[in-house]
């Protein structure tokens, strides 16, 4: 799937998986701040490389929890709406 490949490459660049986000241009750093993987990866990197404590990583942990608090209910609602629509149209058994 070419779109998944492009998204994976862009996401890998923006979350700092290859190199830290701080070396990116300013506008790309702003975009990376809205991706939850950036915060999770930053927290993991600080913990493993610099032996950072959980207390010092509370900002990153809080950011990931906020993303979870928003996206999990949104995903459940979206799934439920899609399931109800498919059930009302009778298309659940087609695929």
Image (cartoon, rainbow, N blue to C red):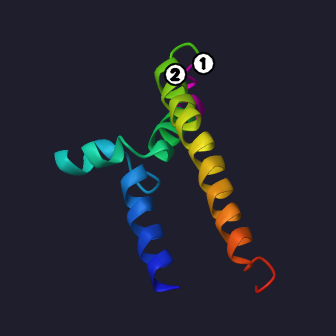
Residue 39 sits above or below residue 79 on the image:
above
**Between 77 and 6, the one nearer to me in the picture:** 77
- Residue 22 location (% of width, % of height): 29, 42
Q: In the picture provided, is 35 more to the left or to the right than 66?
A: left
The residue under the point 48% across, 77% down is: 5
State the residue lying farthest toward the right.
93
Residue 11 sits above or below residue 49 on the image:
below
- Write the start and end of the magenta stretch as one range: 47-54
**Between 61 and 79, the one nearer to me in the picture:** 79
Query: Does residue 56 appear anywhere in the picture?
Result: yes
The residue indicated by pointer 2 is 57
Q: In the picture provided, is 68 more to the left or to the right than 32?
A: right
Asked whether the beta carbons under mark 2 and mark 1 sit within 8 Å of each other, the answer is yes
Query: Does residue 25 appear anywhere in the picture?
Result: no
Q: In the picture provided, is 25 more to the left or to the right than 38?
A: left
Q: In the picture provided, is 32 more to the left or to the right than 43?
A: left
- Residue 43 location (% of width, % of height): 52, 32
| Res 89 quadrant in image | bottom right
State the residue lying farthest toward the top.
55
Distance of label 2 from label 1 (alpha carbons): 5 Å
- Residue 60 location (% of width, % of height): 49, 28
The residue under the point 62% across, 42% down is: 72
Mark carried by residue 54: 1
Residue 60 sits above or below residue 91 on the image:
above
């Amino acid at each position: 799937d070419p779109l998944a490949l492009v998204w994976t490459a862009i996401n890998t660049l923006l979350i700092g998986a290859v190199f830290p986000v701080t070396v990116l241009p300013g506008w790309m750093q702003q975009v990376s701040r809205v991706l939850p993987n950036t915060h999770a990866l930053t927290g993991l990197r600080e913990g493993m490389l610099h032996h950072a404590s959980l207390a010092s990583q509370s900002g990153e942990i809080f950011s990931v929890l906020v993303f979870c608090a928003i996206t999990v209910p949104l995903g459940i609602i979206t799934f439920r709406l899609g399931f109800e629509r498919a059930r009302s149209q009778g298309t659940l058994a087609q695929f």
